[in-house]
Image (cartoon, rainbow, N blue to C red):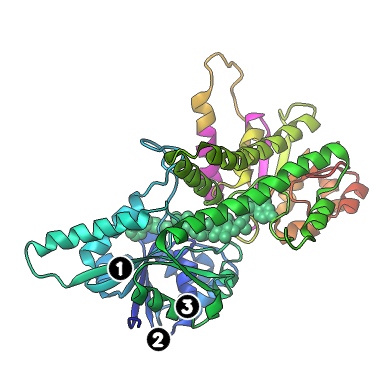
Amino acid sequence: MSLKIKNICCIGAGYVGGPSMAVFADKLPNIKINVLDLNKERIAAWNNEDLEKLPIYEPGLSKLVEKNRNKNLFFSSDLEKNISEADMIFISVNTPTKTSGLGAGQASDLRWVESCTRAVAKYAKNHTIVIEKSTIPVKTAELIKNLLDSYIKKEQKYAKVHKSFSILSNPEFLAEGNAINDLEFPDRILIGGEDIESVDSLKILYEHWVPTEKIICTNLWSSELSKLAANAFLAQRISSINSISAICESTGASIDEVSLAIGADTRIGNKFISSSPGFGGSCFKKDILNLIYLCDFNSLFEVSKYWQNVLTINEWQKKRVSKLIVEKLFGTLYEKKIGVLGFAFKANTNDTRESPAIDIVADLIVEKAQVAIYDPKVQKESINMELNNNLQNFKNSKNDYLQDSKLGEWACYEEIDDVFKNADAIVILTEWDEFKTIDWNNASNLMRYPAWVFDTRSIINEKEVKESGLNLWVLGKSL
Ligand code: NAD
Ligand code: UGA
């Protein structure tokens, strides 16, 4: 038994809501999909005729939006109308770490989940399936259910109410930069829920493009926890390989060769073992912090320490990179121009949230460098916002007795050659394809000698760089 679904809405038109609903609309042409957001500017950007101006850069996304927008895919800020017409509602709002109060620095801030649940409680009519797509703490489904039930209870005091809800968990596993492919060909779909009719209704929708054997149905709490656990496992692999990258540099081993050798073991697998300046993105850190909070809450302190170490290694890796750059450049960056290639947290996205570039570049600025930044997709406003926020923390913590407290500066460039001109060093922080084919002879001619290249993603042609007369450091290698 399943319910007939004709109208879906998704609250939150962000990196998950936008792409996932674009794919839903494409695969389910007979269902009307409304993507809702309180942020009117974001909605206007989703509705922009100029597809270059969509709020999110994601390969393949603009094509899907162009094909389906205003047919069965709509972007709107009208929560009341669209929620009232929906049979199924996805909650896809942000769930960042709390910055103050109880659980600050670890627990998820559920204020956005709460506010959109209240909107659902108020405007929904008849029976509505409410689905957690946001990543949330285990047991959030219970909070959502209690909140929705309390509205029904209050409304029933005054009139007979024909309103009911069932709650499902359906976490999203897409990775930015590969989102459309991940959504069209997912490794698995996870649906958690107790109400079989609702679970089946969602399962049937996915079966339009996902093989049935890839759809896993569990109880609510397993589904909620599996999302946190999956991200923790992925992040742990990166901290593991990054810890080995440091050993490579000290011993003469090469991280590429070690990754190849260990990844050939099918039990380990070759994915997600590329060394890097640290993992970034809006989720790994916050989801591990969320897991740590859950462990501490349940007095599982050893488990919490275990996961804390994944984060500790990640912070250490970023510091290790910035420290090494300073050391190689005579221990001072005063009046030195450092070119930074890539600011996004990974290639093929314009997202900068928690990008390792933020901490590394901020460290260089604290060392008084003149930093020149080039990223093919990130807007300069995002870079300025991230660096201003980060450096504000430094300014706030500055000791009064620090006389020489003037920081360096940064500027963003649209032409890569402007970054090379008179630079003392180039630091590659994101693995964009175009950085793999840089003409190092040309770069070398434009730079000030002695000039360095620091490759934290192990993507450049080492021979070419060395032959061009540049000094080279590659993360995880002792050259
Ligand atoms: P985001 O910040 O890009 O988007 C969230 C959107 O929700 C924002 O545009 C915000 O304005 C909107 N919003 C907040 N409260 C609202 C309300 N009450 N009514 C209407 N709109 C509201 O976030 P995101 O990256 O899309 O992540 C969303 C969730 O998905 C998070 O829980 C995240 O952990 C999870 N997730 C993210 C990714 C990813 O790659 N970004 C992948 C898997 C899961
Ligand atoms: C990650 C997960 O991969 C998704 O499954 C999950 O849905 C998502 O988080 C989420 O919950 O938000 P995402 O952060 O978009 O996706 O991108 P990843 O490809 O996982 O990369 C995360 C970070 O790890 C990047 O900074 C990347 O450069 C780094 N990374 C990745 C490495 O350093 N080495 C690797 O081998 C892989």
Identify the mark nearer the N-term, 2 or 1.
2
Residue at 72% x, 42% y is 243
**Residue 292: x and y, percent?**
50, 42
Please state the total of marks drawn on the protein image: 3
Residue at 28% x, 71% y is 128
**Residue with the mark numbered 1:** 166
Mark 3: amino acid: Tyr
Q: Residues within 10 Å of mark 1 (few under 14, many from 20)?
A: many
Alpha carbons under labels 3 and 2: distance apart: 14 Å
**Residue 150: x and y, percent?**
19, 57
**Residue with the mark numbered 3:** 206
Q: Dot 2 lies on which element?
A: loop
**Residue 43: x and y, percent?**
39, 64
Residue at 38% x, 78% y is 201
Identify the mark nearer the N-term, 3 or 1.
1
464 to 328, vertically: above or below: below
- Is residue 212 visible to us here? yes
Q: Quadrant of the N terminus?
A: bottom left
36 to 410, vertically: above or below: below
**Residue with the mark numbered 2:** 30
In the image, residue 388 lies in the stretch drawn in magenta: yes
State left or right for residue 289 relative to residue 403: left
